[in-house]
Structure formats: structure tokens, C-alpha cells
Image (tube, grey):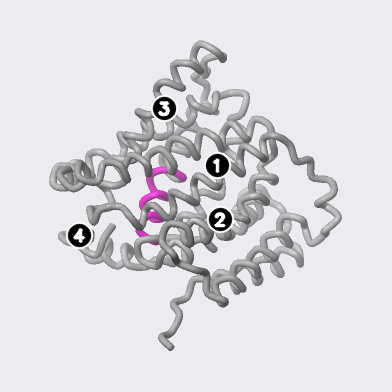
Amino acid sequence: MSASDSTATPASSSWIANQPYLLLCITAMCWAGNAIVGRLAAGHIPPVTLSFLRWSAAFLIILPFAWKHLVRDWPAIRTNLGIMVLMSVTGIGAFNTLQYWALEYTQALNTLLLQSAAPLIVALWSLILLGTRLTLAQLCGVLLSLCGVLVILLHGDLTTLSKIDFNKGDLIFIVALVIFALYSVLTLKRPKIHGLSVAAFTFGCGALLLVPLLIWELGARPVMQLTANNLLSLFYVAVFPSTVAYLCFNRGVQLIGANRAAPFFHMVPVFGTIMSIVFIGEHPQAFHFIGFALVLAGVFAASRKQSAA
């Protein structure tokens, strides 16, 4: 959303729409379960099918709210169609399909470890496309929060790294990360239109671009069965990692920029761990608190606005 996106909205919505750190925390919370759900869906829902149904459902969810904005913003969308389609390809169609494909070959733990590199990849795209460099504080914050992520995921034991089996799924996920990092930076180059217009167009366009691959997949792989677990998985990924998370993420990046928003990727495994403790009954240990403290300190250092010299 741009600065004018919040016009004619209730005061509470306007307040939330201008809280970038809260929005990015909500994003991380919504994404925390995506790798787990994607891993559980692997073998039950083919990756293109899962991605196509996820974004088609998200598009239908958001369309009634976005329609009036889409109509008003259509001239600007048409004028900037190239960047809007590129955002649809990178952030919607390609990234999520590759992520679900990767999870057919690798573990959710591997993807969480690899995802820790996302802020540095975003910084590289920011430098290439926008000429924006990481400040020393941002770099230190990213590295500090990265250490916290590793402490949590490795349970404070570096020897755990030797037990992780990296495979072709990890390579696929690295490609997906590079693509999503590009999307993160591209959101800063989109036209100044309502956030709901951006979401509705990219969701719908991204799903539409997957149709050729979907047709191929339906002929090459078994069709998804309509089981309760599969339908629940689809509901989760359509509502939380898609509709809610992307609206919050896009707005957060618009408010503070891609480099300052990127360290919030490190909050994903933090929220994932908290969910495991709360919902699965895992017991918090010392390494959890050490890791949380490092991540929060790093995110704070990397995302806060630098004072003028």
C-alpha cells in the first residue's frame, strides 16, 4: 500500500497499516507453519496443484474486498503491466511452486536453515536493482539474528550440522529464495496503487500463469485426493501464508524498505519454535531463550531507522 492506501479506512485499520514491525511479525507468524504444512502435503498434493489452488483460493478470498480498488487502479496497473506480471511470476507463481517441489525432497528443517540466508540475498538484489547498500548496523543485525536462528534450529549443538542431509531439494529451495528475494525488492518498484489491488492482481495473475504447468502435472502425476487433511492444508496456505501474510509483507516493505524488512525472515523459525512449544507440547530449553534473544536483538538492530548524520 502507498501512503494514500489507507484513505477511507477505519481508524484501527489505518493504525495497523502503519505499523511495519507488527505487520512483518504477523507475516513471519503466518509463514512459520508453511514449511511444515508443505512438507506434510508432499506426496499427497502435487506441488503445482498446491500452489495453483493456494493462489486461486487466495484470489477469490480477496477479490470482493479488492474489486473497487482494482477498477480504480486498473489504468495504473495497465501502464505498469510488466512489473506487475514480473511480481506475479516471482513472488506468487515461481517461488511457492519451487518451495513445495523442494519439500518433496528435503526436510522442513533444511528449508528453515537455508531461509536464514534470505536477508543477504535481498541485500544483493537491493544493491543490483536500487543501488541500496546494507548499512553496518543492518549487516551486524542480520548476522546476529542469523546466529540466533542457528542456535534454535541446531539446538545449541553445532555438531547437528553434520547430521543434516542436504540434497537436490535444497538446491531447488535456494533457487526459490533467490526468486522471492527479487520479488521483495520489486515490490518497491510497483505503481502507487492500493495494496488490495496489488494483492488481487498478483494472486490472480500468478495462479493463471501456473495453468500450463498444472495441465502438464495433472497428466504426469496422480491427482490430489479430496481428503480432510488435504482440504485443511489448502485452507491454511490460502488464508494465512497467502492472503494475510502477503498483504502484511507488501505493506511492511513499502514502509521501511526491503533491506530493513528482510531480517524478519529470521522470525519465521522463532515463531515456528514457539508454536511447537505451545501447540505440540515441546519443552522450552536454554538454547531457545538464547536463540530468541539473539534473533530479536539482530532484528532490532537491522530494522531500525538510521539517524541522519
- Image quadrant holding the N terminus, namely bottom left
The residue that disc 4 covers is 9
Q: Earlier in the sequence, mark 1 or mark 2?
A: 2
Q: Nearer the viewer, mark 4 or mark 3?
A: 3
Q: In the rendered structure, which amino acid carries the disc numbered 1?
A: Ala
Q: CA distance from mark 1 to mark 2?
A: 11 Å
Q: Earlier in the sequence, mark 3 or mark 1?
A: 1
- Residue 110: assigned label: none
Q: Earlier in the sequence, mark 4 or mark 2?
A: 4
Judging from the image, what secondary structure is the residue with disc 4 in? loop
Among all residues in the image, which is located at the extreme bottom? 309
- Residue 222: percent from the left, percent from the top? 56, 14
Taking 197 as reference, is 106 above or below it? above
- 170 vs 265, nearest the viewer: 170
- Residue 226: percent from the left, percent from the top? 49, 19
* Residue contact between numbered discs 3 and 1, judged by CB atoms under 8 Å: no
The residue that disc 3 covers is 210
